[in-house]
Amino acid sequence: QSLLQHLDAMAAARAAVICLNWLLCSAGPGPFGPFDGKLVKTSDGREKALLPQGTLPGFHRDPSRENGGQDHSTFLLALPSGELLMAWFSGAMEAEYPMHIAMSRLQPNATQWEPTMVIDQTVEANWSNQNPVFIHDPQTGLLHLLHPHQYIGEGQGN
């Protein structure tokens, strides 16, 4: 196994633990916080981080209500540089507007994820953008984002 493969495996293992912990606590404010992206060691040696929601400026979310916002369908990518990228869809309610793609990055050896950002190109009126997938092209260095989108209000029927 090459050093790069070993580092990729270590980053992927770290990413899987972070991803799992984030998924468990992605409902918003509550007893889980603070949602500051800081890595915290657990008693069994794992690391966890709680990332802020990907909320658009001016959009208020009330997590105490069923339609108070959703953040899910995380995708985690370990880059050859050791960086971890996480993307998810975030917004009002699945299949409603606004629903867009948010992301964050963890630099190698960092102790805190970078602030959550909304990917501007995924904010489209009357469309719900979901289920992000990153693909990294090692030959060109380009990072591609693929995701489906559906017209709002049609639920699973479209």
Image (tube, rainbow, N blue to C red):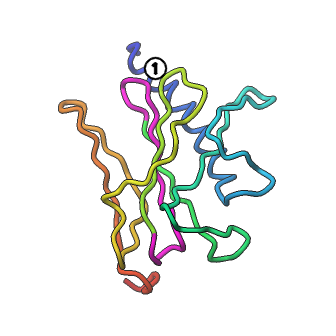
Query: Viewer-proximal residue, 154 or 114?
Result: 114
Identity of the residue drawn at 67% across and 58% down? 28
Residue pictured at 76% horizontal, 31% vertical:
42
Range of residues picked out in magenta: 78-98
Q: Which residue is the site of mark 1?
A: 7
Residue 94 falls left or right of residue 142? right
Quarter containing the C terminus: bottom left
Q: Position of residue 7 (x, y in %)?
A: 46, 20
Q: Looking at the picture, how far across and down is residue 128, in whole percent?
A: 40, 72
Residue at image location 59% in from the left, 68% down from the top: 60
Count numbered badges in the picture.
Answer: 1
Residue 96 horizontal side relative to residue 42, left or right: left
Residue situated furthest left in the rendering: 140
Task: Give the residue type at disc 1.
Answer: Leu
Q: Is residue 59 above or below residue 13?
A: below
Q: Position of residue 10 (x, y in %)?
A: 52, 24
- Residue at the top extreme of this rendering: 3
Q: Position of residue 27 (x, y in %)?
A: 67, 60
Q: Is residue 92 magenta?
A: yes
Tag 1's secondary structure?
helix
Residue 42 placement, left or right of 91:
right
- Label 1 crowd bin: few (<14), some (14–19), many (20+), radius 10 Å: some
